[in-house]
Image: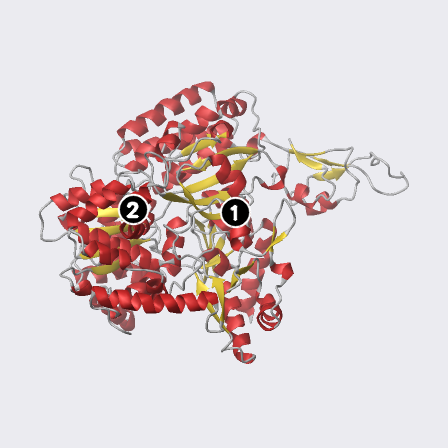
Amino acid sequence: MIKIKSSEELISTHEKLASCLDKKFHCEDGKRAIVVCGGTGCLSSDSADLLERLQTLIKEKGLEDRVTANIVGCFGFCSQGPFVKIFPEETLYTKVKVSDAEEIIEKDIIGGEVVERLLFVDPQTKNRVARQHEINFYKLQKRDIALKGNAEINPEDINEAIGQGAFLALNRALHMSRQEVITEVLNSGLRGRGGAGFPTGRKWQFAYDVESEDKYVVCNGDEGDPGAFMDRSIIEGNPINVIEGMMIEAYAIGAKNGYFYIRAEYPIAVNRLKNAIKQCEEMGLLGDNILGTDFSFRCHIRLGAGAFVCGEETALLNSIEGQRGMPRPRPPFPAVKGLWGKPSVINNVETLANVPYILLHGAAAYAAIGTEKSKGTKVFALGGKVNNVGLVEVPMGITLRQLIFDIGGGIPNGKKFKAIQTGGPSGGCLTEKDLDTPIDYDNLIAAGSMMGSGGAIVMDEDNCMVDVAKFYMTFICDESCGKCSPCRIGTKRCLEILTKITDGKGTMQDLEELKSLANVIKSNSLCGLGQTAPNPILSTMNAFYDEYLAHIVDKKCPAHVCKSLMQYKILPEKCVGCGMCARNCPANTIHKTDKVPVGRPATLPLRVHEIDPTNCVKCGLCASNCKFGAVIKD
Amino acid sequence: MAHLQQHAVEQITEICNRYKNEGTPLMMILSDIQKEYGYIPLEVQELVSSLTGIPTSEIYGVVTFYSFFSLTPKGKYVIGVCLGTACYVKGSQLVLDKFEELLHIKPGETTEDGLFTLDALRCVGACAIAPAVSINGKVHPMVKVGDVEGIINELRSKEAK
């Protein structure tokens, strides 16, 4: 591997590799290029086997001089994966199986014909769409800042990253003074993408202002919010971009060592990052005297071990130091006294992924995107009850309606939208009335939720909001580190009350106590985890008070989720007497009546069935086995 | 410490030596041991303590704090059902219930034959393919209640071969 030892060498290498990349995507050397999605979603649907099959076929059929095939990062449209994209035409095939590889090679690569049946079908127009940018899911997105390089370049090949412009931002930063770099980031308006939205430049300034021989930069990749996978995809899709962001930060504050703290649950991300760091070291882009300057920097990886609280920055520092991941009281803030007592800045993965764009294109270009107080783009992991599940990057300021209905394609099965949960266990639910709110840090807080790290879970009429609150409280109880009593004991009591309510034993007194307890936890907990833990309760109580009342007063769960408050029933007018329900009932509690089904002759042995609720375990097998829609929840 | 086998002692010593130059190597040592053996019993913690000088009490505190570290051995197949929000709203609790019912164990437990360990996971970041079930680290997409029996039978028949 060549070494890049100066600014000039970086630029000439970039130009050379950029033209290679250009040739690859535009077929200038007569070679077409196949890329296959290597995101977690697609990998779990066998996209690695698919790539291998394509490569084998290329070899077998002697097509090596006509086409290449490699893996790329996440396409984001995970519900349609695995993806195969073919350059230069940019044909996008969706839901590709290993068994489709042969047809793609035969028909498209050899025959030059598009495989129609693998194209995306627009659910509204029913037309087949051949190009990525023509798909509604991608139209409102801006995927070139945090998700830059995703689904384009090979995340395991540094040459493609350099061809795309990696390290040019660092190069520019190294020609500026450290204070100028910080000012640039301050002027860009970039705020922390981990959740709290603290201005990134100010964090850097604090650490810059402290005199110390040793300083550290830490990248928080402990993405613990259930329902969020932005950081994972960013690292998996373009690890070099995050490393470059960290290097710029390190130069600005004067750090020589950086630590990536990544969840152990993300093995692919960890491996790609390790590989990227190794390649950077081999090229001399990490180590001593980077690009011939006196800036020296090294990256290290530390794995989490399954503790949500370690996403809290001081708990994370304790974890790196080999201790239990419990938060430290602040002040002193990490910028003054952080890792091993030295000034440290902790930034989220997505925040760092934004930094190279700012340095390369300038603060003004970045600040031109977004709203007045929230600049740039935000990556959301759109999930739950929405048609287009996946990873989206949108400019700040688009509305929730655009996010859910235009990009997300609305709610599946004609169900009604109920709420969107943002901010994970620290956030809240937004409802119908908030749909036209432009998404930014301050608007979401004003609406009773928060930006959080970017999880966005859509819920429909079948989701019970009391159950959702209980779900988050169960999560928090498990994950509370136990250091301070408001969080350790308070969340447990909250969970007990919520369980009582969903069991149908709740009283109005409970509701009052739940609310006052929630406020006590909020104002008295030591760290962000506890301070935000009651948010799901408070926000669902605020927006769905009537659902709480239904559970307590009417002893009903309107969404038919809480098992103690619902039962299965067979509609006699719909039952045809086939007996599928009774045969599948594990509790043997479905019996024949003597009633003849509507429109059936009495001479047949078919009789309307009935559920005896005394033994019913509410497993729902009767409903899922009934082909006539006769079993309902009541 | 007496009943740790010689080669285990050697391997753990080697793991501790890997991180000799690190200031605070405990998490890395424990991660490697967990990966290698599947659990970190007290004897091993005592050995690590004698090798690194970190008190056993502190090591025990760390091992019991993080859900990735285990004091008891895990089954040959570790089945993790994701209970992250995206999976939960798509019914992963029902999938977990089914595994519990068919394997006769609760989350965190291992079957008597040592074949299966059941875990309730906190979001594996595969929200787009919810409900997700991870089996020895490989993520299976969109698992339905009706798929559970087939998954178990497939793993069992793999063992029978």
- Relative to residue A185, is residue A81 depicted above or below? below
Q: Which circle marks residue A137 in the picture?
A: 1
Give residue A27's position: percent from left, percent from top. 48, 69
Query: Would residue A524 be visible to someone looking at this image?
Result: yes
Q: What residue type is labelled 2?
A: Cys
Residue at screen point 39% across, 60% down: A268
Give residue A292's position: percent from left, percent from top. 16, 65
Q: How many numbered badges does the structure rendering display?
A: 2
- Relative to residue A26, is residue A402 depicted above or below? above
Residue at screen point 22% across, 48% down: A317
Q: Where the N terminus of chain B falls, by quadrant?
A: bottom left
Q: What residue type is labelled 1?
A: Phe
> Which residue is at the front of the view, B87 or B47?
B87
Q: Are marks 2 and 1 in contact (CB under 8 Å)?
A: no
In this figure, which residue is indicated by the disc labeled 2? A310
Foreground tag (2 vs 1) = 1
Q: Quadrant of residue A153?
A: bottom left
Q: Between marks 2 and 1, how big is the CA–CA gap?
A: 34 Å
- Badge 1: how crowded within 10 Å, few (<14), some, or many (20+)? many
Mark 2 residue element: helix
Mark 1 residue element: helix
- Relative to residue A560, is residue A386 depicted above or below? below
Q: Where the C terminus of chain B falls, by quadrant?
A: bottom right
> Which residue is at the front of the view, B61 or A332?
A332
Q: Mark 1 lies on which chain?
A: A
**Which of the marked residues, 2 or 1, is nearer the chain's N terminus?**
1
Left or right: B86 with respect to B148?
A: left
> Which residue is at the front of the view, A591 or A112?
A112
Q: Mark 2 lies on which chain?
A: A
Query: Would residue B51 be visible to someone looking at this image?
Result: no
